Image (spheres, rainbow, N blue to C red):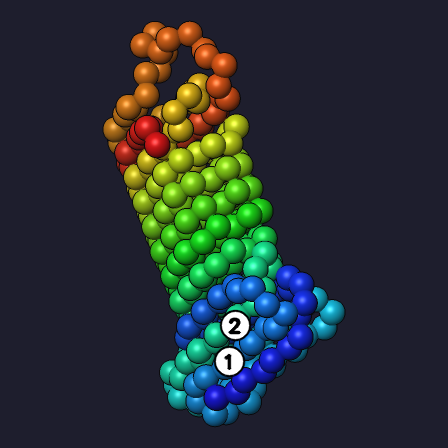
Amino acid sequence: MAERRFHTPGPVELEVSIPAGEVLVETAHGDESVVVVEGNERLVEQTVVELHGGRLTIAFRGQKPFGITIEIGGWSFGSEKLRVHARIPHASGATLSTASADMRIEGTLRRLETKTASGDLYMRGPVEGDAAIKTVSGDIYLDAVTGELQATSVSGDLRVDDVGGSVRVKSVSGDVRVGAARGSEATLQSVSGDIVVGVAAGTNLDVDANSVSGDLESEVPLGSEAEGLGDGPTLVVRGKTVSGDFKVVRA
């Protein structure tokens, strides 16, 4: 195990890049950032932890760790895994890149960017700015994104309870659920996954959705069923699926 402590009187930009294992990020009040790296001793030794200015970097620099070596997306790693625990100030930014490491975040971030092949992402707490998520088969759960949400997934499920800005989501077979879309635009595409979009009370809807073989359904009145536009904001929803269902619900 290796532990590093840094004096960070303000928010930092955290960058984590490891092939496999677990990543835990916590935000807290205070003027210190703490990083703990656990796992096989040789893997820990090959993991660099550095602070330059306001940028805190945790990166695996090794080429061939112990164990059977496999390769995913350019990563080469063995059967051993790394466990990274970073505690950083509230309102920091985070960029997390992994092949198969699961990621858990607890607290408040200014922005979030993740790239993973098969690792899951779970965040309890708000992203106060934008979030950009890319995954192949990992599942994604976020509490809230105040800014814009951009997400791309192949087979992982995506759930975000609340989005304040625009939504742009593309999925192949994973299900997508946005609990409340509060921005002006939500564009969601899926091949075989189901899509559910929640609409806040008082929001006017402009919906253009189609599916080849899936069902289209709305709990919110549309077209001739809708009353005249009110004074509330307008949400433009664009949805497209091949065999998945598309549903608009009340948030």
In which quadrant of the rendered image does the C terminus lie? Answer: top left
112 with respect to 227 (left or right): right
Is 29 situated above or below 241? below
Residue shown at 43% from the left, 85% from the top: 39
Q: Which residue is mark 1?
A: 36
Q: Is disc 2 placed on a helix, strand or loop? A: strand
Where is residue 80? Give x, y as percent: 40, 84
Q: Nearer the viewer, residue 150 or 142?
A: 142
Q: Which residue is mark 2?
A: 86
Is 87 situated above or below 179? below
Residue shown at 34% from the left, 50% from the top: 157
User: Residue 84: which numbered mark, if any?
Assistant: none
Amino acid type, label 1: Val
* Disc 1 packing (10 Å; few <14; some 14–19; many ≥20): some
Amino acid type, label 2: Ala
Where is residue 84? Give x, y as percent: 48, 76
Residue shown at 60% from the left, 80% from the top: 5
Is 205 situated above or below 20? above
**Camera sees residue 41:** yes
Q: Is disc 1 placed on a helix, strand or loop? A: strand
Where is residue 24? Give x, y as percent: 45, 69
* Disc 2 packing (10 Å; few <14; some 14–19; many ≥20): many
Residue shown at 39% from the left, 29% from the top: 199
Q: Quick one: label 1 or label 2, which is nearer the N terminus?
A: 1
- The answer to whether the residue labelled 1 contacts the one labelled 2, judged by CB atoms less than 8 Å apart, is yes
Where is residue 85? Give x, y as percent: 48, 74
Tell me how far mark 1 sits from mark 2, CA to CA: 6 Å
**Camera sees residue 211:** no
As drawn, which residue projects farthest toward the right?
Answer: 53
179 with respect to 61 (left or right): left
